[in-house]
């Protein structure tokens, strides 16, 4: 038997019988952080070491395992299939260690990380969180504003709330409600006792937002209506809705984000709402934590209550 084959069998035998005492933990941490963060530099920043240390740890892990974990140049690494297979299990393991240590240091503190659309968070979720905190005072909900893609293998979220048409990648999705949109404006714009028609829209300032630039165009196409272009554009959806509430013009808004304003009379929706083809969803990983399951169920109940109002 050749020497190369003997070396391979010896390495395979050591790996297949690797015990906890011989696990290269530092190298595994460096590798897991690199895949999750996407760059060795970001992994180095997270772990508080140098780029060179991360690079050496990853190369050493490749030597121990006998497989290539990354392809491409050092400034644009691409994980191999072996790396993609290994990283989720490592993240689950390290997350479990982190939670266990946190429970020892802070036994009464339980934190649930929720990634949420900023406007949805401010106008719908936060006003209802008091109910969740009353029911579960031992769970601290930590909100992060984000509307980007969700990858639980790379990100440290327990729950993510998004709106779109899917698919949702490696996440499990719970449908909250259909996204329905329509024009809204302050009743103060109208003269007392008058109603608004589609012809009147040409006399009002159309409000737009960069996050849904096609909103008016899509609504006009669905209603077979033509409106002049122009108007005023806002950077964030929250600013758009505040402008509409203040009477600066008329905006296209998701029904769920203005339900409370409609109920209070701050806004009116003279033409109702139409489906946009998107859906608000609650996303969680394949194996959610117990607290994430509790929060998902509460969120689903809140969504059902919202639809009945």
Image (spheres, grey):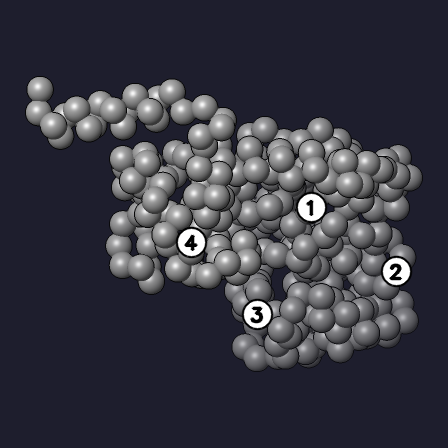
Determine the secondary structure under disc 2: loop
Residue 244: x %, y % from top left: 75, 70
- Nearer the viewer's eye, disc 4 or disc 1? 4
Within 10 Å of disc 2 (Cα), the crowding (few <14, some 14-19, many 20+) is few
Disc on the earlier residue, 2 or 3:
3
Picture residue at 88% right of the left edge, 35% below the top: 135
Question: What residue is disc 4 on?
Answer: 54
Badge number at residue 113: 1
Where's residue 38, x and y in %? 43, 54
Q: What separation in Å lies between label 1 and label 3 (alpha carbons)? A: 27 Å
47 and 277: which is toward the camera: 47
Of the residues under marks 4 and 1, which one precedes in the sequence? 4
Q: What's the distance in space between the residues labelled 3 and 4, CA to CA?
A: 39 Å
Residue assigned mark 3: 210
What is the secondary structure assignment of the residue under circle 3? helix
Which label's residue is closer to the chain start, 1 or 3?
1
Provide the secondary structure element on which disc 4 rests. Answer: helix
Q: Residue at x 8, y 25 (%)?
A: 2
CA distance for labels 4 and 2: 58 Å
Is mark 1 in CB contact (under 8 Å) with mark 3? no
Identity of the residue drawn at 71% across and 29% down? 290
Q: Give residue 242's position: percent from left, percent from top.
A: 77, 70
Q: Where does label 2 land, which residue?
A: 265
Q: Tag 1 or tag 2, which sits nearer the N-term? A: 1
């Amino acid at each position: 038997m050749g020497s190369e084959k003997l070396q391979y069998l010896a390495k395979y035998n050591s790996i297949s019988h690797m015990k906890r005492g011989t696990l290269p933990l530092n190298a595994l941490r460096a590798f897991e952080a690199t895949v999750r963060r996407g760059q060795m530099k970001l992994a180095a920043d997270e772990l508080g070491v140098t780029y060179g240390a991360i690079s050496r740890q990853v190369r050493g892990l490749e030597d121990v395992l006998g497989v290539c974990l990354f392809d491409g140049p050092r400034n644009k690494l691409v994980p191999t299939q072996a790396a993609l297979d290994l990283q989720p299990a490592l993240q689950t393991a390290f997350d479990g260690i982190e939670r266990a240590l946190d429970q020892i240091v802070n036994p009464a503190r339980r934190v649930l990380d929720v990634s949420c659309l900023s406007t949805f968070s401010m106008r719908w979720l936060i006003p209802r969180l008091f109910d969740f905190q009353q029911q579960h005072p031992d769970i601290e909900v930590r909100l992060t504003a984000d509307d980007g893609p969700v990858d639980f293998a790379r990100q440290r979220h327990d729950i993510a709330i998004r709106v779109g048409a899917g698919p949702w990648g490696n996440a499990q999705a719970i449908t909250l409600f259909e996204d329905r949109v329509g024009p809204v404006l302050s009743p103060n714009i109208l003269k007392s006792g008058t109603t608004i028609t589609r012809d009147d829209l040409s006399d009002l300032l159309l409000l737009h937002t960069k996050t849904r630039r096609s909103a008016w165009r899509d609504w006009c196409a669905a209603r077979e209506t033509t409106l002049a272009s122009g108007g005023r554009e806002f950077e964030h959806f929250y600013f758009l809705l505040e402008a509409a509430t203040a009477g600066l013009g008329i905006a296209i808004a998701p029904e769920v984000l203005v339900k409370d304003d409609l109920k209070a009379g701050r806004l009116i929706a003279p033409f109702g709402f139409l489906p946009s083809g998107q859906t608000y969803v609650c996303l969680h990983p394949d194996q959610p934590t117990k607290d994430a399951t509790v929060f998902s169920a509460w969120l689903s109940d809140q969504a059902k209550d919202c639809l009945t109002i």
